[in-house]
Image (cartoon, rainbow, N blue to C red):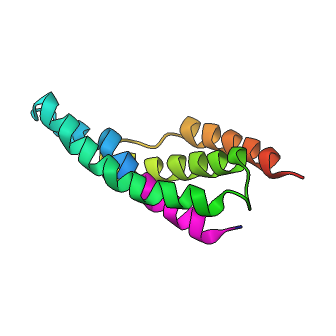
Amino acid sequence: MPWITVGLLTISNIFMTFAWYGHLRFKNLPLWKAIVFSWLLAFFEYCFQVPGNRLGYGRLNAAQLKTIQEIITLSVFSVFSVAYLKEDFRWNYLLGFIFITIGAFFIFKK
């Protein structure tokens, strides 16, 4: 497993999650400001995502890279929604994520 790719995609996903959902805590913030702030964060997301995918591609195919990214996204978002947005993490979310992880197993099966 190319761990540098996983690390870069994890950092990228942290920025992505804040860009997509961080503004939800600031409902009084004007929409245009939320958009500008999100775009600024997205720039940093791409600074890690592009090299992560470029370094990983070749050792992994595009489907495997996308699968890794989705698993990372679910993991980062799970922590984010509980820690930052103060939402509950329910059993059905866990079960759904487990099924997605099982699907990922088949993507990597030779």
- At horizontal 31% and vertical 44% (from top left) the residue drawn is 19
Q: Vertically, is 109 above or below 52?
A: above
In the shown orientation, is residue 10 left or right of residue 17?
Answer: right
Residue farthest to the top? 31
Q: Percent from the top left, x then y, of residue 9? A: 52, 58
- At horizontal 27% and vertical 42% (from top left) the residue drawn is 39
Q: Which of the 4 quarters of the picture holds residue 55?
A: bottom right
Q: Percent from the top left, x then y, of residue 71? A: 60, 49
Residue farthest to the right? 110
- At horizontal 75% and vertical 45% (from top left) the residue drawn is 102
- State yes or no: residue 4 in magenta: yes
Marker count (numbered): 0
Determine if residue 86 is in view. Answer: no
Q: Percent from the top left, x then y, of residue 1? A: 71, 67
Q: Which of the 4 quarters of the picture holds residue 29?
A: top left
In the image, the segment drawn in magenta is 2-14
What secondary structure do most residues of the magenta stretch adopt?
helix
- At horizontal 71% and vertical 44% (from top left) the residue drawn is 63
Q: Vertically, is 55 above or below 79?
A: below
- State yes or no: residue 3 in magenta: yes
Q: Percent from the top left, x then y, of residue 42? A: 33, 47
Residue 73 or residue 44, whichever sits in front = 44
In the shown orientation, is residue 106 left or right of residue 82?
Answer: right
Determine if residue 68 is in view. Answer: yes
